[in-house]
Image (spheres, rainbow, N blue to C red):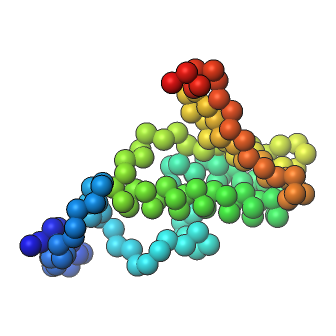
């Protein structure tokens, strides 16, 4: 039994073998991947609308070590986002991440939702870096 067919650029169609059902739907995408996505190599790292604005801001960060750590955080988030997309999850509704270069040389990366925000503070002294989750009281009553 054939579950799906994969069409290639050459217009050849190859049947994929039958797979056991899983708790969520996995549909083939119109892209070819080989192996696991690498957070350390990405041909166009800021191409995702999720991280593009933040990635552009990081290019203006003066401290190269702070900038590198901020890029690493964004790459991890982007890789996770892409992995979920490849599994068929619709994440198009997620707001983009924002980054801010702060006067003290640190970078603040925030993901702002309606009732809460998640933030990552990248400090020049890495021991002072951290993350936070801030929510309003409406979030606690749901």
The part of the image, by quadrant, that contains residue 46 is bottom right
Location of the N terminus (image quadrant): bottom left
Instruction: State which quadrant residue 115 falls in.
Output: top right
Q: Who's the residue at 87% across and 52% down the image?
A: 128
Q: Position of residue 55 (x, y in %)?
A: 64, 54
Image mark count:
0
Residue 113 lies left or right of residue 17; in this view the side is right
Q: Residue at x 72, y 57 (%)?
A: 70
Residue 7 visible (yes or no):
no
Occupied quadrant, residue 136: top right
Question: Can residue 141 be seen?
Answer: yes
Side of 95 where 9 appears, left or right: left
User: How far across and how far down the image is residue 62, in percent?
Assistant: 84, 56
* Residue 6 % position (x, y): 20, 72
Looking at the picture, how far across and down is residue 66, in whole percent? 81, 59
Residue, far left: 1
Q: Is residue 60 above or below residue 5?
A: above
Q: Is residue 121 left or right of residue 97?
A: right
Q: Residue at x 18, y 76 (%)?
A: 17
Residue at point 52%, 39% (across, down): 95
């Amino acid at each position: 039994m054939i579950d799906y067919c994969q069409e290639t650029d050459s217009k050849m169609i190859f049947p994929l073998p039958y797979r056991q059902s899983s708790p969520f739907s996995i549909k083939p995408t119109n892209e070819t991947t080989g192996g696991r996505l690498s957070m350390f190599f990405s041909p166009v790292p800021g191409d995702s609308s999720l991280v593009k604005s933040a990635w552009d801001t990081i290019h203006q960060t003066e401290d190269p070590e702070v900038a590198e750590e901020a890029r690493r955080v964004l790459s991890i988030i982007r890789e996770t986002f892409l992995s979920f997309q490849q599994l068929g999850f619709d994440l198009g509704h997620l707001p983009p991440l924002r980054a801010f270069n702060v006067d003290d040389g640190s970078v603040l990366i925030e993901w702002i939702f309606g009732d809460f925000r998640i933030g990552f503070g990248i400090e020049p002294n890495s021991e002072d870096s951290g993350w936070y989750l801030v929510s309003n009281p409406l979030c606690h009553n749901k």
